[in-house]
Image: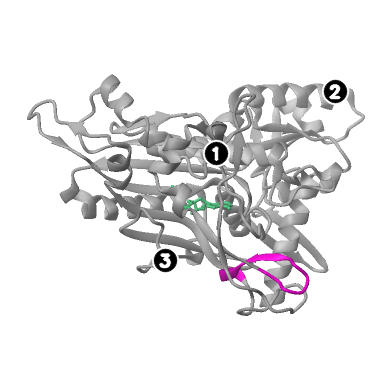
Amino acid sequence: MENENKNLMEKIISLSKRRGFIYQGSEVYGGLAGTWDYGPLGVALKNNIKNLWWKMFVDSREDMYGIDAAILMNSEVWKSSGHVDTFTDPLVECTKCKRRFREDQLKEKDVCDDCGGKTGEARQFNMMFATQIGAVEDSSATVYLRPETAQGMFVNFKNVVDSFHPKLPFGLAQIGKAFRNEITPRDFIFRVREFEQMEIEYFLKPADWEKYFEYFRGEMLQWMEIIGIDMNHVHELEVGDGDRAHYSARTVDFEFDFPFGRKELYGLAYRTDFDLKNHGLTYQDEDTNEKITPHVIEPSFGLDRTVLALMASAYTEDTNGEEVRPYLAFKPSVSPVICAVSPLLKNKPELREYAHIVYRMLKDEFGRVMWDDNGNIGKRYRRQDEIGTPWCIVVDFDTLTDDSVTIRDRDTGMQERIKKEDIVDYIKDKLN
Ligand code: GAP
């Protein structure tokens, strides 16, 4: 089983690179640890996830307000939020080879993962990336790259209340980059130094926190199901006292059985009034004039971990005799390419011309459509299967006389003949 999982991880990493999902960051210069670059298909996958998330948690709701805050924030934000003092991980150094590790991630306590030497005393290491703003290099010019998108929402709480006058409960939502100087980035895009979060800060009356904690727990589970994460591999973990982040009075982690083990995918936290109180922000009810510091429920979703969980959930292999057919069984709504269009033969102008009309029609309708005339039809199907394209459309000689095309289903390999004018509805029906 361990070997199988190791293989699965290797297959996902190799497919990601070969087919243009994810490349090593700064690869031509030997890479930069803990950074990855998303290629054309990876960007498409991420954008689909972000759009679905925004639709579900912002656009379809009446109580949610979008934010896109600056990544660089006044350092007072991070002093008030507790990150300057407490956003740390325990770091140990090997007394022999001097390599550094996160103490809680060592395979064996007090033993170096690399050389087997003894590790020294742990010291706390702050994970925020500091940089200098402007031309002066002194401590007053130090700013941090945000380690969570959350604070961008807390510091805009009053702005949104003043502009929109929302009634409690309501939420702010944001998708954006976050940065953490992880001591040991590892497991592909699972633990990286630059990543994206999709977060909600939901403000409410203190007495309502349990009700909305349960409510968002349900919403998070529903989200995972909607996008196609394998729910058999999702587990909830009540995070115990002492293990929670400094701001949280209750946390439930949603863990996923990644190929390298069961690890945190998302988190749901009850941040109480910790952040608003520390920033000195309050809310006044316009009807009753009652002034309170709202409490906060925070559903937090890592985008890169979503991509990895989706790829691991979708990766499938069929065997037909000797031949193994790998494919990504993505839901059409997240799949980077909805359909590919091919002329049966590459060198027949009349087929190419017709296929191009079909391609243009579908591209105008769905956007995520690929032209594929490379190699023979079998090779094209295999390539599209590997990147998770749900449908392949082929224009052949019959098309020229009856205006019908073949449409092949990725999962079953079955082909149907349909009229050109019915393709859009055929796909739309299956998308909804
Ligand atoms: N605002 C709350 C917060 O940031 P967190 O549990 O530290 O909480 C939230 O992070 C989510 O961000 C995690 O559940 C995970 O999905 C993602 N995440 C955290 N650190 C990460 C890293 N180094 N690489 C990739 N994703 C990460």
The residue at which mark 1 appears reads as 144
State which quadrant residue 80 falls in: top left
Query: Residue 102, position in %: x, y?
Result: 61, 65
Q: Residues within 10 Å of mark 2 (few under 14, many from 20)?
A: some
Query: Residue 238, position in %: x, y?
Result: 37, 67
Q: Residues within 10 Å of mark 3 (few under 14, many from 20)?
A: few
Q: Amino acid at mark 2?
A: Glu
Q: Give whichever of 35, 359 is nearer the camera.
A: 35
Residue 392 appears in the picture as rendered: no
Quadrant (top left/top right/bottom left/bottom right) for the N terminus: bottom right
The residue at which mark 3 appears reads as 243
In the image: residue 8, left or right of residue 233: right
- Identify the mark nearer the N-term, 2 or 1: 1
Q: Amino acid at mark 3?
A: Asp
Q: Give whichever of 9, 280 is nearer the camera.
A: 280
Let me know if residue 104 is in the magenta part: yes
Magenta span of residues:
93-105
Mark 2 vs ligand 1: CB below 8 Å: no
Cα–Cα span, label 2 and label 1: 59 Å
Q: Residue at x 78, y 70 (%)?
A: 97
Mark 3 vs ligand 1: CB below 8 Å: no
The residue at which mark 2 appears reads as 350
